[in-house]
Amino acid sequence: MRNFASTKKRRHESGYGLVFAAFGLIVLLGAAGMSVDFGYLRYQRRLIQSAADSAALAGAAQLGAGGGAAQAILAAQNDSQINGFQDGQPTASGTSTISVNATQITFGGNPNTMQVVVTDIYPTFFMRIFGAAMRNVTVSTTATAQYLGGRGCIYALAGGNGINLSGAGNIDVPNCNVFSNQNISGAGSITAAAVGASGSSTVASTPAAITGIQQTPDPLSYLNPPAIPGGACQTVNYTANKKGGQDPLSPGKYCSITFGTALSQSVTLIPGTYVITGNGGVGLVFKGSGTITGAGVTFYMRGGSVQTAASQNLQLTAPSNGILFFQRTANNSTATIAATGGSKLQGALYFPNATLNLNGGANNTAQYMLLVAKSLNINTNVRFRSNYSSLPSGYSPIRSTALIE
């Protein structure tokens, strides 16, 4: 005879098992769903962190280049936008807007510090079952413009032919780094704090060159061209000695300045900016045999080229911004610079879209030099010790930034 009580009990037990199984399945699905949501939110946080870090560095770089707080904030927000997080843009959920809050602060006594806080809101997929339909993801990061010793002082920029050292070309800059965005070639040698090439290097270097590095951005791209004086440009063409000596030259706008091979007199340049427009294809030509002295001078090559000869004694020092030669990016005229032994070229030689040839006399008494050009051909000994104590800040004009938290 069938035991109905036993059958009924088994049915109850089966029902409980189904309930427990269903509950366990819900827990497992919930755990799996939360794992998916947490993974998604962690991924989004990494994206925001990268954007915030980059924005803070961009803002700090603007501050370090002399920009005001408003310019730095705009630089930070523009950089964040490039990385996908635009201030005021609707969030992925459509319920709010993305916030990119950039603020200039002082950290460790350094006012060139930018703090960036990025906030976005993301929908969840499974956590909404438990009432968490949206999640705020907020990242805060801080960067400061720092001025570090041992940084780069010689750069061959992208798009050029790299650094070439002739048989007489040697670089001896033990306190700074040498970078080429192409190859380093030739028969000379390099001694530096570090040597790096995006391509290959066939020269002897101490330490050994690191090849295949990422290309280095233009370290002086932050420079703004000087204001161009109004009125017509002046043409200076000294082809022979003047009775009673040579008059000093004053800053201003020049079509060209030429010191011919027959000029043996010394000339003094009054401190300031000399804008060369390059009318007629002539720029700045120093081919005499006297001494040209200029303390606190900058030559802005709007047009024309720089051509100096090994017969000319050059005693030229940059002003407080550290920029001696500054050639406009749109001007791709090749510069050839040479001078007699004992000459001094103290400051940055900046030719961002042109070839710079150094052909003698670069073994000078300068405390520092910066060589930044699209291509660098060095046919002389280049020696300096990167001493920036003569500048008001005591630091190189080349800026660098670092994240601090």
Image: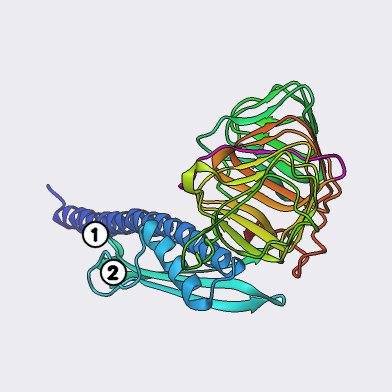
Does the magenta-highlighted stretch encompass residue 340? yes
Could one spot residue 403 in this view of the protein?
Answer: no
Judged left or right of residue 198, residue 35 is: left
Instruction: Name the element at disc 1.
Output: helix
Q: Which mark is residue 89?
A: 2
Q: In which quarter of the view is residue 322 placed?
A: bottom right
Magenta stretch: helix, strand or loop mostly: loop
Q: Residue at x 57, y 43 (%)?
A: 305
What residue range appears in magenta? 330-342
The residue shown at (73%, 43%) is 177
Disc tally is 2
Quick check: 306 above or below 404?
A: above
The residue sitting at 73% across, 33% down in the picture is 359
For label 2, the crowd category at 10 Å Cα-Cα, with few meaning under 14, some 14 to 19 and many 20 or more, is some
Give the residue type at disc 1: Val
Residue drawn at (76%, 48%), measured in percent from left and top?
241
Q: Nearer the viewer, residue 199 or 117?
A: 199
Q: Is residue 270 magenta?
A: no
- Between the C-alphas of marks 2 and 1, the distance is 47 Å
Image location (x, y in percent) of residue 89: 28, 69
Q: Amino acid at mark 2?
A: Gln
Q: Which mark is residue 19?
A: 1
In what element is the residue under mark 2? loop
